[in-house]
Image (cartoon, rainbow, N blue to C red):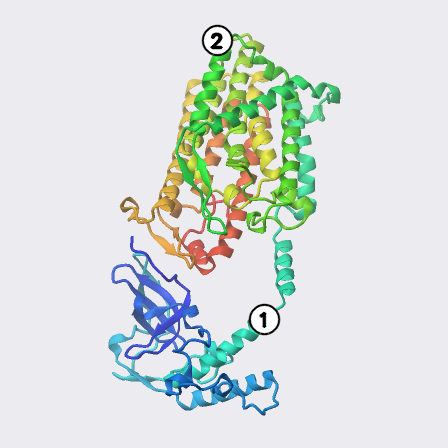
Amino acid sequence: MPSRKFADGEVVRGRWPGSSLYYEVEILSHDSNSQLYNVKYKDGTELELKESDIKPLTSFRQRKSGSTSSSPSRRRGSRSRSRSRSPGRLPKGSRRSASASYQADLKEARKEARKDMLEVKLTPLVLKPFGNSINRYNGEPELIERNDMPHKHTQEKFHLSQESSYIPTQYSLRARREEIKLKEVESKEEIVVTKRPALLRTSEVTATQSKDLEFGGVPGVFLIMLGLPAFLFLLLLMCKQKEPSLLNFPPPLPALGDLWETRVFGAYLLWFLLQALFHLLPIGKVVEGTPLTDGRRLKYRLNGFYAFILTSALVGACFFWNVELYYVYRHFLQFALAAILFATGLSVYLYARALKAPQDELSPASSGNAIYDFFIGRELNPRIGTFDLKYFCELRPGLIGWVVINLVMLLAEMKEQNRAVPSLAMILVNSFQLLYVVDALWNEEALLTTMDIIHDGFGFMLAFGDLVWVPFIYSFQAFYLVSHPNELSWPMASLIIALKLCGFVIFRCANSQKNAFRKNPADPRLAHLKTIHTSTGKNLLVSGWWGFVRHPNYLGDLIMALAWSLPCGFNHILPYFYVIYFTILLVHREARDEHHCRKKYGLAWEKYCQRVPYRIVPYIY
């Protein structure tokens, strides 16, 4: 897959055929076979240019006046002319102001440039047809509609416009000496433009950040931080009722003293420290993350799957030593409160340490507002030595804890319902979610390119989500089945299994294709994929799984979420809360992705949206 230097829609400078002059052109398309760029000049002329005949606009900026090649006096043969006698400066006795001198030079340069307008003759051999034409777009023909304008002669003259409101973007064929004078004027104009007060730039950045606050801004995140813990307890209390319904709402609330137990908090703290110890073990390969703003790339040790194996061995030892795991189910609310308090304390620590963090280590999502930054996270990669707190919490205590809680619920169902073996519904829920967790840990490296790692800081949002929401809400189906058994037939179970496998195939194949492309876009196994080149140097996939919808991995996630809930039957909406919540979460996450990609890729993203119109699924648009 050959690389491209310039993106479609990018404005650059192209060399006029048969001359050494460069003028502003717009990149229309690129032919991957001939490696030619189809460009459009300001008068409407379309040509095919080689990459060597195209240069970025920045390469035409005036170099420093100390350069030998840019000094007009030295080209004339003068050996020791003083700076005050240079053509761009005023005589010594002049009293004009600097701004008046600049305006006079600018006016004179425009006047002289317009005197030397050139006419260039082109043959039809180098011109693209002005009518409807077929361009090559990433290896695929694309029809571009244009106004019909037939050729009248074998040779035509193209007169470029003489009017321009700004010299650097003026489009005319000038003699070389006029370009030199104009560059001198441009360099002065650039100095005037760039000398802006630093305070003004800071205020503009602050104003922009305040407009981009997500989750409803400061009031929204404040309500989320207060509402999520209360909502979690409400769901768990309703699920423990024998007949959960709106008629029994709200459920009876336990006394606050019954929700706290020191032994439970100690057990939760021991669990967290145990997973931290597994993470610090020198096993598993070490990889580099995405480049930071200062060019550094942090190192991460991938040993999540090994930590899962060690945890499984520890749980097996608990069975062997007759440790009562049913204790977790009987104190489930107390464990939830312990996790909430721990996550809140961790968030306070993270915000306090972030106040001393350097500017280049802050999250792009941080705003400067204390409440919002406490929620979204102020520091991007908080570390204690080499121990990355955010990366550790993303996959270890909560995700592995989710599997352990599911196993506890399976044992609790057998004890509560006096069963010799667990129900088929409970087995399916445990198996489906176990496969999901093992897949995440096995493909741990993919986490390094997610929005959580590269954009969001580590604050209450991720701390609460990783340590509380994931283990206590994602295990909600298993918790529901303990008190509300559902006998599942094998034909129905077969359909649910097929649905789960369908979602998993979409999810895994889409993620694998994306990760392989990010690692090595030139991989021959990916040569069949079509892409859109962007000005950042990266490519956007528009075929394969990523040509079906913009987020095929989200589509697979939603299908799997539905398969997790179906074994619970249709007696109540409670086990389907996860599907409803997850749909809202992914739609909101997709909107955040859209916002960031639109700002990052610009015109290329607009073309991507035209090629792949559907976002998550065809009916969520």
Q: Which residue is mark 2?
A: 320
In this rendering, does residue 85 appear at all? yes
Amino acid type of disc 2? Answer: Phe
Residue situated in front as seen by the camera: 144 or 185? 185
Amino acid type of disc 1? Answer: Lys
Residue 301, relative to residue 15: is it above or below?
Answer: above
Q: Position of residue 330 (x, y in %)?
A: 63, 15
Q: Which residue is mark 1?
A: 195
- Badge 1 marks a residue whose secondary structure is loop
- Which quadrant would residue 345 be assigned to in this image? top right
In this rendering, does residue 569 appear at all? no
Q: Position of residue 341 (x, y in %)?
A: 66, 29
Q: Position of residue 510 (x, y in %)?
A: 39, 40
Residue situated in front as seen by the camera: 390 or 597? 390
- Which quadrant would residue 226 be assigned to in this image? top right
Identify the mark at residue 430; answer none if there is no mark: none
Report the side of 247 relative to 284 (left or right). right
Q: Position of residue 241 (x, y in %)?
A: 66, 19
Task: Tell me how far mark 2 sits from mark 1, CA to CA.
Answer: 74 Å
Q: Earlier in the sequence, mark 2 or mark 1?
A: 1
Report the side of 221 relative to 154 (left or right). right
Q: Residue at x 41, y 28 (%)?
A: 283
Q: Residue at x 43, y 38 (%)?
A: 446
Q: Residue at x 28, y 59 (%)?
A: 32
Q: Residue at x 61, y 59 (%)?
A: 205
Residue situated in front as seen by the camera: 458 or 479? 458
Q: Residues within 10 Å of mark 2 (few under 14, many from 20)?
A: few
- Badge 2 marks a residue whose secondary structure is helix
Viewer-nearest of labels 2 and 1? 1
Residue 242, relative to residue 9: is it above or below?
Answer: above
